[in-house]
Amino acid sequence: MTSEAMTAPAHHHAEPMHGAREFLTFTLGDEEYAVDILKVQEIRGYDPVTAIANTPAFIKGVVNLRGAIVPIVDLRVKFHLGSADYHERTVVIVLNLSGRIVGAVVDGVSDVVSLSPDQIKPAPEFSNLLDTQYLMGLGTTEQRMLILVDIERLMTSKEMALVDESALARRAPVHH
Amino acid sequence: MSIDLGMFHAAFFDETTEHLAEMERLLVGLDLDAPSSDELNAIFRAAHSIKGGSGTFGFSDMAELTHVLESVLDLLRNGAMQPTREMVDAFLASADVIKDQLDGHRAGQIVDPAAAEFVARGLERFLVIMDASASAIRSAPLVAEAGEASELYHLQLRFFIPAGTTTERGLTALFDDWAEHGTVTVVQRPPEGVVDGDWEIHLTTRDNEVKVREDIAFFADLSDITVNPLPAREEEDSYGFFQPLPEAAMTAAPASADQGFGFFDDAPGVPAPTADPGFGFFDDLPTPLPVVAPVATPPGAVAVPYGFFPNAPGAPHRKSPSADAAKAASATPAAPKTEGSSIRVSVEKVDHIMNLVGELVIAQSMLAQVAAQLDPAWTIRLQAGLDQLERNTRNLQESVMSIRMMPISVVFSRFPRLVRDLAGKLNKRIELITLGEGTELDKGLTEKLADPLTHLVRNSLDHGIEATDVRRAKGKDPAGRITLAAFHQGGNVVIEIRDDGAGLNRERILEKARERGLPVNDGMSDQDVWQIIFAPGFSTAEQITDVSGRGVGMDVVRRNIQEMGGTVEISSMAGVGTTFTVRLPLTLAILDGLSVAVGQEIFIISLGFIIESMRPKMADIRTISGRSQVVQVRGEYLPVLPLHELFGLEPVAHSPDEGILVLLETEGRRIALFVDELVGQHQVVIKSMESNFRRVDGISGATIMGDGRVALILDVGYLVRRAGRAG
């Protein structure tokens, strides 16, 4: 393996507020996104991938993550944000979505924020990048606006082509 | 004391499943004309164990049904009735119901009692048939108890009690406890009145070794206990070392307590002479050593009439007990129990170890690659260590693999019953022969193999073997023969399902295929014609039976086998029979593969599909309709499939004569796969693509190479179909 797992960014808030949830924030182009920290397994550098033929361009391929074959998705390519180049500072967020592991390439990882329910507003209908069904809402903290992504729903969606449809059908009833 | 029985349930379910399978196997194999009493006993014991277990765990429905079953079996066992075909049918039916009940309890559901009621009534019929019906039924459980008592453990127990850890009273209380259901003989002990020291005890008890060990450890905190089985059967008959004794009653089954074992009987009137010859051999002793009988018995009753102790009247002179003890000790290891030679481990644990070992193999080959780049002058010792490591990891990997290997008999064992039932239903006479039952293959494969094999056997029975009168008219043995054979061939397990039936009918298959609009012609090779029966929905059966003939299944059979990485082939000759040959990899986890390069990528091809590799001459390459290429190999034209085109890669070799053609064969078809070059041959650990990703056309899995990168394993079946479509 060519790169070691990096440690997750330090938490800014020692005590999460009551009912608050923690999110890992990352950037794609100029926009700031966030995902539920509980879905994040680790953050790594970008290892060379083994390409898979006849897959969409945003599926870079598969890598060996401690013996498991894990697909790598470049969210920058998927959403046409940022520049899709790969160097030693390229970051992969390794997500664990109900036992399925997926790596997501992003522009950069910022920090972990804690958001209470009143800091999360419903997402407006005009997001052109992401269908609102994949959004949990917009989070506001310290003048920042974070786009909260329902990463599990997004990654297991048909348009990401990461999961067999038969497997999707099986998973549907237990979706949380 | 309340114990959570839940943790024992899993063991009970597993054991009962085994008992049922054993019972079924014995029942199907039972020779009705001359039933072996060993087998009848074994069947009875299986039913009895199920009854005992279900009673313990409160599964009363199972206990009730097995009780009735056991009652009938007991009559058979005692020779009170002769087994008949109807009985065996009824037993098998009740075994099925018990299986359902078991599955119900396992899933935490209640099973409809009607089925149990029905089969129980069927069983009771046999009890009523008996002359003294009422008494027979009543007495059955009693006889069963006596039978149970004969299943006793004869154990030799040795332990050392450190000073001050327990009292004599504690021990004697334990001995009393054991003596209630058996006998206790103290062979060696510290002097009277002293409890600490070496003890040796011979025990006849219902408890097994583990229970006895727990019991004794409870009374005295002992670390050093040896429990050995004593030769039980011999004891009952003649005891070897006690040979001269007319009544070898010492540790014999207490069930026959009336004969000589009066010492557990409180009755003072037990005739002394009967006991005497049996117990007298402890005289001549310098110290009052050997026997502790239940201390609770009135002292007088023990001491005087039984003559355990020296100078007791009527004690005949015998050999010294130390000589006896020595012989006993030497006899002990002669009859080791096979129990405890295997353990039950959950498959997840084994799989976890497998994964870890897989990682280890990868890490080891990574190290080897790095070391190979170092200056050998500096690294001789490192190299030697790495070589050692490689050998060790290979051995470890093979050992772990072998844990998962199971004999194919676990699959074959279901067929005697299946064939018996189906043959009865179809009114055919069938002889089933199984060969190579010890052939081992991966447990995962045995599980997946059951369905397709069942289907093939059914198919042979229903369509392959002709009706009895047809066979007679043809001058064949009226009893059809189905042979299941398993053997290893190269890196594969081969399973053949042979029948000596009518064989496949080429004309009929072609005719049906035309009716269904399948692309066929009369010039097709037999092999191609036989493959048609694997087409979805294809059936040539004249009438649909409830056994088979709906044309559902052969396509599923082939798909199931291919999903295991296997192939199925047919050979058939009219009037002689048909053979289905299923070829499977030894294991799902490891693959012998050839790695090939295309552009920057490495792909793995399972060696099982490869006929040969070659660099063709341009003269052998022909182009068809300006696009598709074929290559001529020994007079045969094979379609050329460029892998780079299929996967959209930029190749190094653009023309077949610059690269390599790998000839692949599966499903009776051959293609030439065009790649840049051959890289090497490896044994690779197969990793699933689907666990985190999804199925990819043309790829059957992935593996991790020595440098930690992922290489994809080609799905040869897909490539061949793909080439067929293109050509």
Image (cartoon, coloured by chain):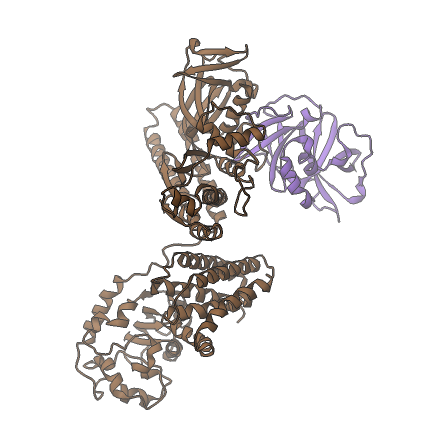
Position of residue B163 measured from the top left corner of the image (x, y, whole percent): 34, 73
Q: Quadrant of residue B169?
A: bottom left
Is residue B44 rendered to the left or right of residue B654?
Answer: left
Position of residue B642 measured from the top left corner of the image (x, y, whole percent): 51, 18
Is residue B252 rendered to the left or right of residue B67?
Answer: left
Position of residue B476 measured from the top left corner of the image (x, y, whole percent): 36, 43
Q: Is residue B307 visible?
A: no
Front-most of residues B194 and B259: B259
Q: Is residue B132 above or below residue B589?
A: below
Is residue B442 rendered to the left or right of residue B694?
Answer: left
Residue ranking furthest to the top: B619
Which chain appears brown? B
Front-most of residues B247 and A158: B247
Q: Residue at the location (64% across, 35% down)? A: A165
Q: Quadrant of residue B225?
A: bottom left
Q: Quadrant of residue B35?
A: bottom left
Q: Residue at the location (42% across, 47% down)? A: B469
Which chain appears purple? A
Position of residue B652 measured from the top left corner of the image (x, y, whole percent): 49, 14
Tell how many labels.
Answer: 0
Is residue B615 rendered to the left or right of residue B57?
Answer: left
